[in-house]
Amino acid sequence: MRIHKLTIAALAVAAGLSLTACQNDDDSAGKSDPSSASSASSSGGGSGSGGSDQGGGKDSGEQGTAAGTGSNEDGKIDKCRTDELEVTAADRTIDGDGEGTVAVTLKNGGGRDCAISGFAGVDLKTSEGALSAKRSGQPADTHILKDGESTYFGVNYPVNDSGGSGVRVTGLVVTPPNETKSVTLDWPGGGTLPVTDGSGSPVKVGPIGGIGQGG
């Protein structure tokens, strides 16, 4: 019986040792799992963060380019077109001047800002046919017309004080700068021009932005 008791005790001790060893292994495995999970989480988080940054950067870059292009296109100021301009004319002759002056007004009604510069084309319709105005020697600047704003230019012509019937003026044809479409207006100036020798046009047109003498 003594032998059996020792044998049973020895088996119990061995079983206890085996159980302790198993628990230690489980503890070690349990400790290694959080470490592995943390490492994977960091790796996944880093990859996710990098992917998000790259994706966001790409998207932001594309949106920035598109916005920039749109802004450039929207910010561009195109030329004033004939269909956007309200063209009128009025006599502005000053008593005592040797020349008559007609002021032509160009009002921007296109709903947008536009740029205008240089000289308009001007033709007088007369009883002797069309008479094209000659450009003056004045400098021409660029003007930005906001919607609803106006600019002007002058048409200078010789006053018929010869006593003769002269050349009858029946109309004024205006072509805005850099345009091909014209507007025909009633002529508000003197009814006739003096007869010339045909060596050159007696009518002069000033630059956009001024209504002074043609010079």
Image: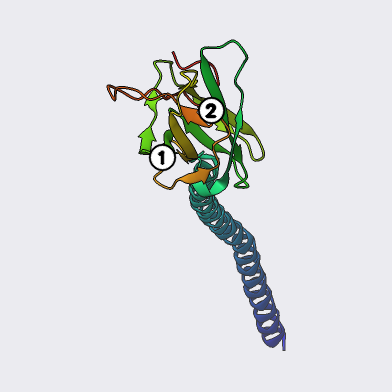
Residue 186 found in image quarter: top right
Residue 129 at x, y percent in the picture: 36, 40
* Rendered-image quadrant of the C terminus: top left
In the rendered structure, which disc, 2 or 1, sits on the residue that comes first in sequence? 1
Q: Taking the image as drawn, is residue 30 in sight?
A: yes
Q: Where is residue 143 drawn, in percent x and y?
A: 53, 28
Residue carrying label 1: 127
Helix, strand or loop at mark 2? strand
Amino acid type, residue under disc 1 in the picture: Ser
What residue is drawn where x is 72% and y is 84%?
5
Q: Which residue is mark 2?
A: 143
Q: Which sits in the foreground, 95 or 68? A: 95
Residue 107 position (above or below residue 7): above
Among the 4 quarters of the image, the one containing residue 36: bottom right
Pick out the residue farthest to the top.
96
Select label 2 or label 1 by which is in front. Answer: 1
Q: Is residue 203 above or below residue 149?
A: above
The answer to whether any part of residue 79 appears in the image is no
Cα separation between marks 2 and 1:
35 Å
